[in-house]
Image (tube, rainbow, N blue to C red):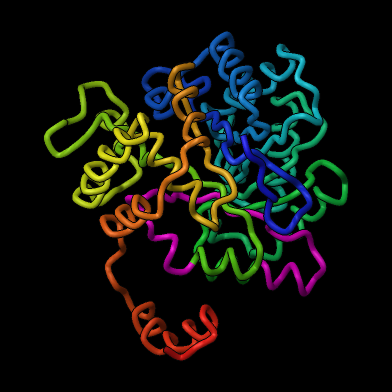
Amino acid sequence: MRYRKFGSTGLFVSELCLGTMTFGGESGTMYGQIGNLAQKDVDTLVGAAVDAGINFIDTANVYADGRSEMLTGQALRNLNIPRENVVVASKVLGETGTRAVNSRGLSRFHIMESVKASLKRLQLDHLDLYQVHGFDPATPIEETLRALDTLVQHGHVRYVGVSNWAAWQIMKALGISERLGLARFESLQAYYTVAGRDLEREIVPLLRSEGLGLMVWSPLAGGLLSGKYGRDKQAEQGSRRTTFDFPPVNRDRAFDCVDAMRGIAEAHKASVAQIALAWLLHQPAVTTVIIGAKRIDQLQDNVGAASIQLTESELATLEEVSALPAEYPGWMLERQGGVRQRLLAHGTLA
C-alpha cells in the first residue's frame, strides 16, 4: 500500500480509503439497499483493511442514520487499533435522529450539534477530517467556515474538507478562509470514474491549482464498472443497480469503457473492477479512492488494484474510449492556449 500527501497538509493517507456506507443499513431503506452489515462483519472488514495497509476510514453521520459511525467506532475499539494508526473522517449536512427544522444544513447550530453526536457514536475525542457533505443554500459560506474553524481551534477536528460542491463554491470558500485567516478546506470528496470524468472540466484544475486533495467516491459507478454489467449483460434482480440506480452514468460510454477494460484485465490477470480502480490511481489529481465492500473477497479484490501498473498504451486506450465531449470554454481555452502549453512543456514553439 502506498501513501499520499493529503492536500497541502503534512498528513499522509493510504491511496485506498475504506468507505463505510455498507455498514448498518436497515432493510426497506436506501442504506439497507447499499449494505446492512452487522458488527461482526464490520470488524472483519475493518481488520482486513488495516492489515492491508489502509490507514484511512471514511464515514458520515447520515449513513444508516448514524449506525455506520457507531459500528465503525466499535470496530476500532474491538480490534484495539491504536488511534494514531488510523485517519478517521466523517461528514455533516443531512439529518439524523429527530427531524426538527434545524436538524440539517451547515449552520453553526447544526455543525456544533452534529460533531458532538458523531464523536459520541464513533467513541473518539476528535475527528481527523470533518467534511461538509454538500452545499447548503440557506447558510452563508462564511458562517459555515467560522464554525468549522472553531472546531479546529478547540481540537475537536484536525482538518476540514468539502464534498459535492461546484468549483465556484469551493473557490469562494477558499478565498473567504484566506481573507479571514480561517482553517481552509484541504480536500474534496467527489464522484469520479473512467466513465464519468466531468470533474476534469473545472474541478480538477482547481484542486491542482490550490493544492487540495481529492477523495473519490463511487469509483465503480455504483457497481456499473464492476465487470458484472455490459451491453449484453443486464443487472440481476436484487443487485445494487436494480434497487438503487445511482449515480447517473452515460451507459453507452460506460459500456465502451467496460469493453476496453475487459481486455486490459485479461492481460493483467485482474478483474475489471481492479482496472477501473487502477485507472483512478494513475490520475495525478487523485489522493485516495474510497472502496466499499459487503464481503471480504470484494475488499481483497479492490485492494489488489493498488499493485496494478497500467502501461502507457493501456492508459491511452482508456483515455480514448472515455474522453469527454468538447465543451465551452474548454475547447476555446485549448485553442487559444495551445502554443503556450507546448512552450511550457517542451520549451519550443514547434
| Residue placed most toward the observer, 114 or 125 | 125
Quadrant position of residue 50: top right
Quadrant position of residue 200: bottom left
Residue at x 42% of width, y 85% of height: 338
Q: Quadrant of the N terminus?
A: top right
| Residue placed most toward the observer, 169 or 116 | 169
Q: Is residue 296 left or right of residue 162?
A: left
The residue most toward the right is: 154
Residues in magenta, as a range:
174-202
Point out residue 194 in the picture as x, y percentages from the top left corner: 36, 50
Residue at x 54% of width, y 82% of height: 344
Q: Does the segment drawn in magenta span residue 233?
A: no
Q: Is residue 291 left or right of residue 151?
A: left
Relative vertical location of residue 45 with respect to residue 274 in this rendering, above or below: above
The answer to whether residue 218 of the structure is visible from this angle is no
| Residue placed most toward the observer, 330 or 116 | 330
Residue at x 87% of width, y 51% of height: 153
Count of marks, rendered view: 0
Residue at x 38% of width, y 39% of height: 275
The answer to whether residue 318 of the structure is visible from this angle is yes
Relative vertical location of residue 184 with respect to residue 337 in this rendering, above or below: above
Point out residue 142 in the picture as x, y percentages from the top left corner: 70, 65
Point out residue 238 in the picture as x, y percentages from the top left corner: 26, 21
Q: Does the segment drawn in magenta span residue 201?
A: yes
| Residue placed most toward the observer, 317 or 61 | 317
